[in-house]
Image: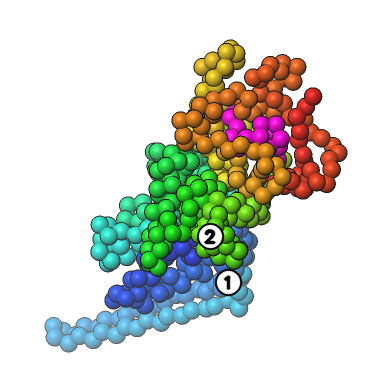
Amino acid sequence: MRFNSLFDRCNQHGLLIAVRSLLLTANASQLRKRINSCSQMLLQPLNEEVVATRQMESATSGEIGGSAELSVGTTARAVAGGASKWTRRNAKEQTATSKYSSSKMQLLQALAPTLSTEISDAIEALGGQETGALLILDDFYFIPRNSQPDVLAYLHQVVRGTGVWLKIGAVEHRLNSFREGDPPAGLQPDQDAGLLRIDAALKEFQSTQNFLEGILEGISKVSSVTLDDLITHTGRQRLVMASGGVPRDYLNLTSKALAKATTRDSSSARPRNRINAEDVSEVAPSLLDQKQADLALDADPAKAESLRNRFNHVATFCTRRLKRNIFLVEATKLSEEQWGQEINALSELRFFHPVGSTTVQSSSARYVGVRYEAFALDLGAYVGSRVARNMKSIEYWTPVGAQELRAASLVYDPTTNVADKADDAPSKLAEVAEITEPQREQLPFPNATLFTEAT
C-alpha cells in the first residue's frame, strides 16, 4: 500500500494543520516534538530490516559480616561488629544480535490514537466540535485503486469523533471507497459517507444554464458587464452544451471564446467583443484536445487505449451514420457490458454528456419496456470540421427535441447482429483497416482505430 502517498497528501492538505495550530498554546515545545516525530515517519520506508545489538557482562557480588558482644556484671557492655562487601567482574563481555522486520503500517496504526487525540485537542482549542475542521483530499484517484479502501479506513480511524470532516474528490469510476471482506474496509457510500456530484448535468438543461450563468454573472458584474452584452442568446446555449455542465469547462470556454470575439473582425452579424455561437464552436475543439491529454491521467492507464477506441467508435456512429449529436444506450448494458462500462467511463471523463432517460418509440418488440440512457457527443468532436455541416443537433431540452430523442435509429449497440437490420434497428459498426488521411484527420483521436458502418 502506498501510505507514503497518503501521508504526503495528508501533510499537503492539512491533516496536521490542526495540530500545528496548538503551537500557539502553552505546550508548544512538546507539540513540536510530536509533530517532528510524525514528519520523520513520512520518510520511513514501507518495510525495513532492523538489527538490534545488546552487550552483556557478568558480575558476582557478595557480603561478609559478623559481630561479637562482651558483658561484665550488670552495667558494663561492649559490642563489636563489621561487614565486608565485594564484587568480582568477569573480563569477558557477551554480545547478542537479533533481526526483525519493521512495517511502516504497524507504526502508522500505533500512531493513529495519538493523532486522533492531538487533533481532538486542537479542535477543542479552536472552538470545539461546533467549529470543527474540513480535510479535503482532491484527485484521490491517483492513489492505487486497490489501496483506496485502506487509506480511507485509516483516515476515518484518525478523524472519527474529532470534529473533522473528510471531503474526498475523485473521478467517480476511478473511486474504490469500500471493499467487502472480514473485516470490510473503507467507507461505504450512503452508509459511512454521502456521495455528492458537484458538476451540474445537462439533463436539466435550463437549471444548469441558470447555475452556470449565475457564476459568470457574479464575475462579470464586477466590471459592470451584463450577460446580454457579453454573449448572444445562441452563444449562451452553445456554451452550456460545449461545457457539459462543468463550471470549470464553462468558464474556460467563455474566456477562450471572448478572446476569439475580441480579436476577430467585426461585422453586423458578428459584432466584435460579443461572443456568439460560432465563437464557441471555434474554441470547443481545444477543450477536447485538453481532455485527450488528460485521458492518460484521469483514466486507468491500462484502459486508456480502449477508451480512445470506444470514443472513436461512438463518434463515428454519430457523425457518419446518424449525423446527430445524440445516441442512446440500453441502461442495463452500461453496467453489464464492457463496452457499456467504457461509455460510462467516458461520460465521467466528459467526452459524452448524459442528457436523461427515455424509451424508444417503435413498433418492434425489442424496444418494449426497455429504458435507454441518452448521451450527447462532446461538441468539440464534430464542430469545426467538414462533418459539422451535415450534423443536426437535437435540442433535447425542448418538447420537439425530447420527441426526436426517442428514435430507434439513435440506439448504439456494437454487438447487434448485422443480419437483423430493420429500418429502425440499431446499426453495427465494423473496424476498417485502411482509411484515407482526410478521414483520419477528422477523427477526435487521429491515431486510434476508425470504425464505419458494416455492410
Q: Which residues are magenta?
A: 310-329
Q: Horizontally, is 202 left or right of 27 in the view? A: right
The label on residue 258 is none
User: Mark 1: which amino acid?
Assistant: Gln
The residue carrying mark 2 is 271
Disc 2 is placed on an element classified as loop
Which image quadrant for residue 98? bottom right
The residue carrying mark 1 is 55
Identify the residue shown where x is 49% and y is 44%.
177
Residue 347 at x, y percent in the picture: 57, 41
Label 2 to label 1: alpha-carbon separation: 89 Å
Residue 317: within the magenta? yes
Identify the residue shown where x is 43% and y is 70%.
35
Q: Nearer the viewer, mark 2 or mark 1?
A: 2
Q: Horizontally, is 69 left or right of 422 in the view? A: left
Residue 443 at x, y percent in the picture: 73, 45
User: Mark 2: which amino acid?
Assistant: Pro
Crowd tier of the residue under label 2, counting other residues whose Cα lies within 10 Å: few below 14, some 14–19, many 20 or above: some
Asked if residue 59 shows in the view, the reply is: yes
